[in-house]
């Protein structure tokens, strides 16, 4: 009886498979036949998604803000590199705050040198072991440059 069932249900002997493009070709032959047959099995192969890093949009920096950053960072790289990393982070954060305060002052029609000086001195005091005279000199130079920048932006008022 098992012989009769085997005659009616051809069992396939699996041969090795190979992939061609997105199709997989399966070569198989029934046990009772000597001529191999080929079946084409189409598999839906989803393409591997390519994930590209998305560049962060660069913020458009106001030229006035960029000029203030350049003025404030002049002659401070040596002192900045001498600071420990934790102090550098505090100094950088306070520097960004200082730039935003000065930028808001620059939008006014008239600014007072004393206001600018106080803001800059408060930031420069974060430098550890800074000489009092160095602090006065640097803050005065930076204040003068920022006042000059304000005059250029507002037409020598």
Image: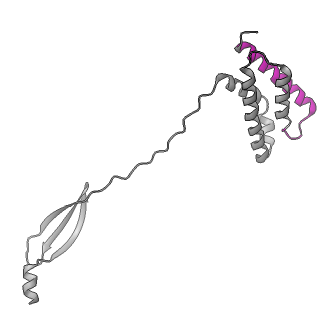
Question: In terms of image quadrants, where is residue 133?
Answer: top right
User: Where on the picture, by quarter, is residue 93?
Assistant: top right
Point out residue 23 in the picture as x, y percentages from the top left corner.
23, 57
Which residue corresponds to the image point at 27% horizontal and 57% vertical from the top-left?
44
The quadrant in which residue 18 appears is: bottom left
The x, y position of residue 25, in whole percent, is: 20, 62
Magenta-span inclusion, residue 146 = yes
Depth order, front residue of 129/60? 60
Please give the range of residues in magenta.
126-152
**In front here: 73 or 75?**
73
Task: Tell me if 51 is positioned left or right of 99 in this view.
Answer: left
Where residue 9 appears, as percent x and y from the top left, is 11, 78
Residue extending farthest to the right is: 132
Q: Quadrant of the C terminus?
A: top right
In the rendered image, the vertical position of residue 72 relative to residue 29, given as above or below: above
Q: 84 left or right of 47? A: right
- Residue 141: x percent and y percent? 83, 22
Image point 37% across, 53% down: which residue? 48
Closer-to-camera residue (123/101) = 101
Magenta residues, dominant SS class:
helix
Counting every numbered tag in the picture gives 0
Residue 64 colored in magenta in the image: no
> Considering the image in quadrants, where does the N terminus appear?
bottom left
Left or right position of 78 against 136: left
Q: Is residue 150 above or below residue 124?
A: above
In the image, 73 versus 107, the foreground residue is 107
Residue at the image point whose x is 79% and y is 33% from the top: 76
Image position of 144 with respect to 86: above or below? above
Image position of 152 (left or right of 7) = right
């Amino acid at each position: 009886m098992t012989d009769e069932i085997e005659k009616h249900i051809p069992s396939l002997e699996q041969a090795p498979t190979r992939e061609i493009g997105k199709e997989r070709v399966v070569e198989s032959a029934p046990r009772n036949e000597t001529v191999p047959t080929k079946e084409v099995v189409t598999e839906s192969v989803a393409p591997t998604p390519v994930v590209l890093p998305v560049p962060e949009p660069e913020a458009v920096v106001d030229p006035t803000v960029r000029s203030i950053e350049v003025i404030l960072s002049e002659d401070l790289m040596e002192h900045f590199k001498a600071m420990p990393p934790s102090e550098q982070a505090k100094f950088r954060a306070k520097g960004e705050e200082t730039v935003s305060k000065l930028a808001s002052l620059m939008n006014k029609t008239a600014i007072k040198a004393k206001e600018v000086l106080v803001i800059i001195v408060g930031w420069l005091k974060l430098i550890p072991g800074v000489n009092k005279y160095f602090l006065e000199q640097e803050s005065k130079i930076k204040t003068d440059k920022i006042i000059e920048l304000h005059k250029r932006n507002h037409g020598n008022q």
